[in-house]
Image (cartoon, helix red, strand yellow):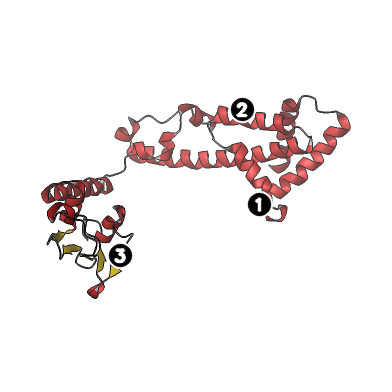
Amino acid sequence: MSIFPEILDVANCYHLLVQQKAAPRGEVRVHCPFCEEIVGTADRGFHLYLNPIKNTFHCFRCQEKGGVAKFIGRLEGKGEQEVIDEYKAKHEATRRKKRKKKTWEDHPAMKLSAHQWKLMGFLGKIDGKMFHTNPNYARAVLQWAWREWQLFTSEKSKEAFHVLLLGKYLANEKAAEDFVRKTERDTGIESLWERAVKMHQIPKDLWAEWAKRADIIVRELVEAIRNEEKAADLEWTIQRELQKMKERTA
């Protein structure tokens, strides 16, 4: 596999394919950008032949020809060897990046803050020293923590949807959004409110089963709320009703 781009892609980047003609052997004819410099007048006769199979070019007017590296060099005002060295360096950097082994620091659980670890019930974030003293145990803890975080975020997403429904049915969506935004700040989980809104915008018959159950539960709770109070303090009401919902869905 060549480390160089296709010659037609290079020509396209420099808008040389805007005007073109077909040629034998699958080649493409375009106006030569080098003729004016070499011959003294611009090429208006499609004398530059581009060969996508061999990745070469040849102008039959100014006689400039070569491979794609030389073609790039002529277009960018560089020497052919300079272009070759640049592409070799890029290829080597890409190869090294692919070969780079992932370390414990690359694990997604390590991207979580110490506060987020504590939210899941851990005493704190795992210490990097553990990977040197007991690497197998440390990797197991990371996997465990990441599973717990996924469950935690899923629970908070469902909770946000419950709150959205409460806000809509109690005609106080702004207070519901404020409550969810506070949860986002406290947990570091982004877009909880946006995800809840997106779920609500889907036709009800396409809702996930848990969302359909949530709608039924919230409707019942809202009726109970309306019967006993006007829910002036929605934040307190949400806290109380969320606890009730957790008890009913446990």
Q: Residue furthest right?
A: 227
Residue at screen point 18% across, 54% down: 36
| x and y, in percent, of residue 99 in the image | 25, 48
Residue 247, above or below 207: above
Numbered label attached to residue 20: 3
Q: Is residue 114 left or right of residue 152?
A: left
Look at label 3 and name its amino acid: Gln
Residue at screen point 74% across, 45% down: 215
Look at label 1 and name its amino acid: Ala
Secondary element under disc 3, as helix, strand or loop, is strand
Q: Nearer the viewer, residue 236 or 21?
A: 21
Residue at screen point 12% across, 54% down: 38
Q: Within the image, what quadrant is residue 152 found in?
A: top right
Look at label 2 and name its amino acid: Lys
Q: Nearer the viewer, residue 38 or 126?
A: 38
Q: Nearer the viewer, residue 10 or 104?
A: 10
Secondary element under disc 2, as helix, strand or loop, is helix
Residue 125, above or below 81: above
| x and y, in percent, of residue 181 in the image | 61, 30
Instruction: Quadrant for the C terminus, please.
Output: top right
Disc 2 to disc 3: CB gap under 8 Å: no
Report the Cα–Cα distance between label 2 and label 3. 60 Å
Q: Nearer the viewer, residue 27 or 203?
A: 27
Numbered label attached to residue 182: 2
